[in-house]
Amino acid sequence: MATTSSPRPRLKIGIGLPTLGERGRLGSLEAIAAARHVEALGFDAVVAADLILGDGTPTLEAMVVLAAATAATERVGIEFGVLNLPLRPVVWVAAQVQALQHLSGNRVVLGVGSGGIPDLPFWGAVAVAGRERGKRTDSALAVLPQLIAGKPTRLPDQSGQPIVTLAPAAPVPPLLVGGNSDVAIRRAATSGDGWYPSQITPNTLASGVAKLRQATADREHADPVIHVGGFTIQTGEESVRAARPARESFVRSLPGNHGISPEEATAMVIASPAEAAELFAAYAEAGADSISVSPGIGTAGANWMRRCELVAEAHRMMA
């Protein structure tokens, strides 16, 4: 008798809130409206990137943005995509995540990373050396879950190794480790609940998923979650001519920053719902459980809202 494979679970989609660059022109009321629009369209999460440059580029800080989104929504996940652990004292991160869990009804998804651009002015301003980012990330991951859970936790890297207990305790949110490297995959296997790569092709994702599943084969709990970030949709009511320069600039930046070819970089920028649906399906086939999408480059207001609707249309096309 022929056997049939069980259908893949529905691919979850989070939407990146407008927090960086020209999109940072959005005021707080518009950012709240954006979060509500994401929830109304049926998406699974609102996402905030943690990328303060310190060079004059407008940015909205991720923790504050997600606190506002928490107050403005009732259902969607509150997702960090991703929080740069080396830049913050781990006790402070734990206390803030505890608060967000209580305020949101335990909707936080905690993507964390070591910070991809340590030569930015902001890193120097907070006195964190890029060479220390791996060590600081590992040290934070070693104690972060216990701190959020309200357990007495010794901080071995602090002077005097104090024992800290944070209250009120909160459920530890899913902890997804960002980064595309083998180091990030090993870190996800040993210290996280899943992997959060970004700007990665389906083929490279499939290879990474195989490595991660091999590394976690002996774990007693559930298979690691695979979440992919970094997609941008560049279409909508604005003219193609107006959108093209921003798209081309973004595509040119990807090979240097993420080590991918120009052809692969072009594929990361989605131009239509049909194109998006095809790409989303390829990532699901490669092992992704969820993805996050940014509704545009240098986009605000009505165009941003419209692009969310186009992503929703693409998601429906996959059904």
Image (cartoon, rainbow, N blue to C red):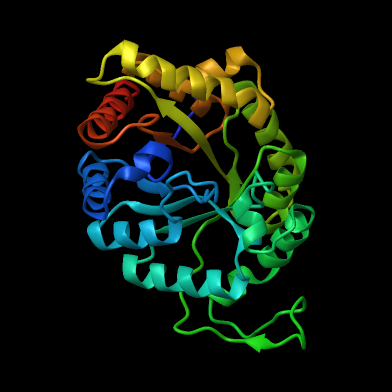
Report whether 159 appears left or right of 304: right
Residue 58 visible: yes
Percent x, y of residue 30: 23, 48
Q: Quadrant of residue 318?
A: top left
Report whether 272 appears left or right of 179: left
Residue 192 visible: no
Residue in the image at 22% along x and 43% along y: 37
Q: Quadrant of residue 88?
A: bottom right
Q: Nearer the viewer, residue 107 or 92?
A: 92
Percent x, y of residue 116: 65, 44
Up the image or down, 261 lies above or below 45; here it is above
Residue in the image at 74% along x and 51% along y: 218
Up the image or down, 301 lies above or below 59; here it is above
Percent x, y of residue 255: 64, 23
Report whether 190 appears left or right of 301: right
Percent x, y of residue 180: 67, 37
Up the image or down, 152 lies above or below 178; here it is below
Residue in the image at 60% along x and 38% along y: 197
Residue in the image at 23% along x and 58% along y: 72
Q: Nearer the viewer, residue 229 or 133?
A: 133
Q: Nearer the viewer, residue 309 or 126?
A: 126
